Structures are given as structure tokens and as C-alpha cells.
Image (cartoon, rainbow, N blue to C red):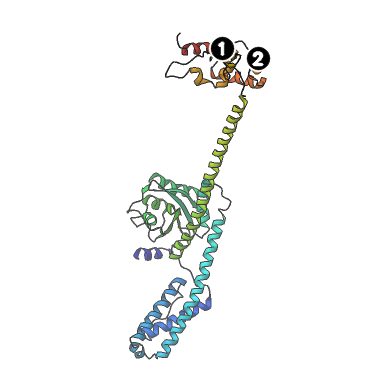
Amino acid sequence: MTSKIAAVEDGWSPSTQAIDDAGLRAQVAEVLGRAARVLEGADAPAEEESPDLSSACSRIDDATLALTASLRSGGSSIRARGTTRDEVVDLMLDLRDVAARLGEAQEVARQESFGRVRDAMALLRGVNTVEQMLDQAPIAAARLGFDRTFISAIQDSYFVPRTCFIKGDTEWAAAVVRAGQDQPRRLDRTLLETEMVRRRQPIRVLDAQNDPRVHREIADVSMSRSYVAAPVIVQDKVIGFVHADYYAQRRLVGATDSDLLWMFTEAFGFAYERIAYGERIAALRSSYMRTMADAERNFARAIEEEISFDEHLVAPQHADEDGVSRPAAPMPMHRPVSGERSALDALLTRRELEVLRLMASGATNDGIASRLVISHGTAKTHVKHILRKLSAANRAEAVSRYFQLEHRTQIPS
């Protein structure tokens, strides 16, 4: 409390919400003055100034509780001051009416706060990527009325600033971020931000320069006196924080400020989750489309290898003595040495091996196409693939390479 009073005396004012309705201000002052005289006597000091909305509600409640307790105890102390029981009841009814009006004023203020949060989030509606969102988030948070805001992330249990906004001073904003990134602090019990992770609630710091639990490097560079911070929660996990203060306005933050920032970070967390999922889905869709495109190309290539009847698929027929046609004995084939694949089998497809054997027999592209019942273009494509896979400059070199590899894998007779 002492540090807060010192800050006020140093030119820093508390963050309060004034009672805008002049009639309500006068009614609050009048009813609190009457309560003070009833409870404390005729010599009770008059109200010097109208309290703010929050403190007015608290003082009305305190006066009502004190009067109720006095009546329950018999009211002797009140009667001793010359106040009748009926006068006390009338005063309590007036206190109730004022409390109701203050409640309405608080609800109006609450709705105005929601409006500011909507205005802040409106800045993020056109954002399409996570990086854009992190860049725009501190600017959006400043629309709540704060002078300075910055966004930080939790990386491997460390508190690391990402972006900062200080109106009209980008160099100072960059220095604040750099101070945190150069000296990242681990989220342990010595750091205030750890409370946000543990409790999933905002925090309010009234004396940042003297509180040992703040991030000292950031506090020194920012020169913050008082700030609020709220966690960003995605999928029930705290992934970062939003900090804000009133440095330029020389105001200490209040309870309303932490509530306001908390509303913003809740909305921000939902929006961030939507953008992050959108990016993931887009990446998966792109990967899926690439996979499908590759599959289509492979399918088209397989379709190009038309099926044909040749000596490798159908064995020659011969007629025996009774005139019945039966398959002849299978033709001898080159087989790789037991336990290893042919080098050609590893390099070429079955169709490419067929083409290469026809090339070795001296067949032209037209001859290959005719023999395998495929188009001239398909035969030419097969030849091109064979040259590339065998690292051959021309057909002759490919055929030479073919004989070399075949010779290595033949079984000695």
C-alpha cells in the first residue's frame, strides 16, 4: 500500500471509474453522509469528494451491514445519538435504492467494456495467419485504452516476449522485446507470470519497479510502474500472455483493467485457435493435393505401360503325337545370383527391361512400339527414361551398359 501511495504522490493517479451521472453522485454523497452521522455521530466529517463507482458500491455495502448489525444488537448506540429506529430503516431503504442504481451503472460500464473488446477484436478479423495475428494483437489490445501492450509466448517453460506496441515509439517497443528475449526467464515460483499459468487468471501489479517477482530486465527497460497481465488459453493450456499499462497517462492499473484485459485475452485465445487450425488444415490440404497429384502421375505412367502378349507372358504351343496342343517347355531366362536382385531389376521397371532388350536386338522406336503394341511416343518415352536411369548418352551406350549388367548376374553354365 505504501508504494501505491508513493506512486500517487509522485504524479501517478489510481485507475478508477467515475460516476458519470451527476444526480447519482449527489445521491451517493448524501446517503453516505447520513450513514456516517448515524453510525459515528453528528461530528462525523462530511464527504469531501464523490467516490468512484467501485468504492461507492463498497461503502454503501459497508454502511448497510453496519446499520443492520446495530439494529440486531438492539440499536442502543444509534438511539443514543438521537436517531430513531424508523429513521434508520428509512436510511437503509435509501441505501438499497442507491445500491441498485450503482449496480445499473456498473452494468452499463460492463457493457461499454464489452464494446471496447469487440472494437479491439475487430482489428483482427482480416488476419489470416498466426504471424499476422501476433503482429496485430498488441495494437488491438491498445484499443482497450492502454498506452502500451506486449504479447509473449511460453517456450519450453520460459517466458519469452514476441511483440510490443508503444504508440509513436517503435524503437522503445523493440527494446522491450529484446530485453525479454535476451534474458528469458523460466516460469518458476520466483516469477509472477507463473501464477497466471497455475491459476489461469489475470494478475495486477501495483509496484513493478520494486516487486522482486517481476521480470527485472523488462521492468528496467520499460520503466513500468503498474501493469496488468492475462493468460492466453488455447485448448485448456496457457500458451502466452498479454501485458498492458497506462505509462503515458501516468495511471496505476485497477481491478477493472484486469477484468477488461481478461475478456480480451479470452476472445483472442478463441480467435488464435481458429487461425492456427486454419493454417494446419491448409497445410494438410496442400500436402494431400501434392500426394494425389503424384499418385495420378504414377497411375498415368502405369497405364502407359500397355499389357501385351509376348514370349515373356505366354509360352509357345506345340502339338504332341495325338494332335493336342500343349505349352512348350518354358524358355530359359537369366536369373540373378541367389540372395541378390539383378542390378537392372533395381534400376528399371519390367516394361523398361522389355524395351531395353528390344533395343539390344537392334529394334528402332517404331519396331519397339510395334512389338509391344504401344504408341511411338510411349516407346520414345521409355527409351528416354532408360538412358537417364543408366546414365547413358545414347542408345549404343545404354545397350553396352545392359550387356555388362546382365553378364554380372548370369548363373554360370
Disc 2 target residue: 367
Q: Position of residue 371 (x, y in %)?
A: 64, 16
Horizontal relation, residue 355 to residue 161: left or right: right
Pick the quarter of the image with the N terminus: bottom left
User: Disc 1 residue type?
Assistant: Val
Q: Quadrant of the C terminus?
A: top left
Q: Residue furthest top?
A: 413
Q: Nearer the viewer, residue 248 or 162?
A: 162
Q: Position of residue 81 (x, y in %)?
A: 36, 89
| Residue beneath the point at 51% across and 20% down | 347
Residue designated by label 1: 399
Type of amino acid under label 2: Gly
Please rate how many residues cluster around mark 2, counting C-alpha atoms within 10 Å: few if below 14, some from 14 to 19, many from 20. Answer: some
Q: Which residue is located at x 64 percent, y 22 percent?
A: 378
Work out how far the residue at label 2 is from the one at label 1, CA to CA, in angstroms.
16 Å
Q: Observer-nearest residue: 77 or 403?
A: 403
Residue 381 appears anywhere in the view: yes
Q: Element type at marker 1? A: helix
Residue 325 tag number: none
The image position of residue 224, as x and y in percent, is 42, 56
**Residue 393 in sight in this render:** no
In the image, what residue occupies the spot 57% across and 14% down? 357
Task: Say if 183 sits above or below 383 in the image.
Answer: below
Residue visible at 37% across and 54% down? 194
Q: Position of residue 385 (x, y in %)?
A: 58, 20
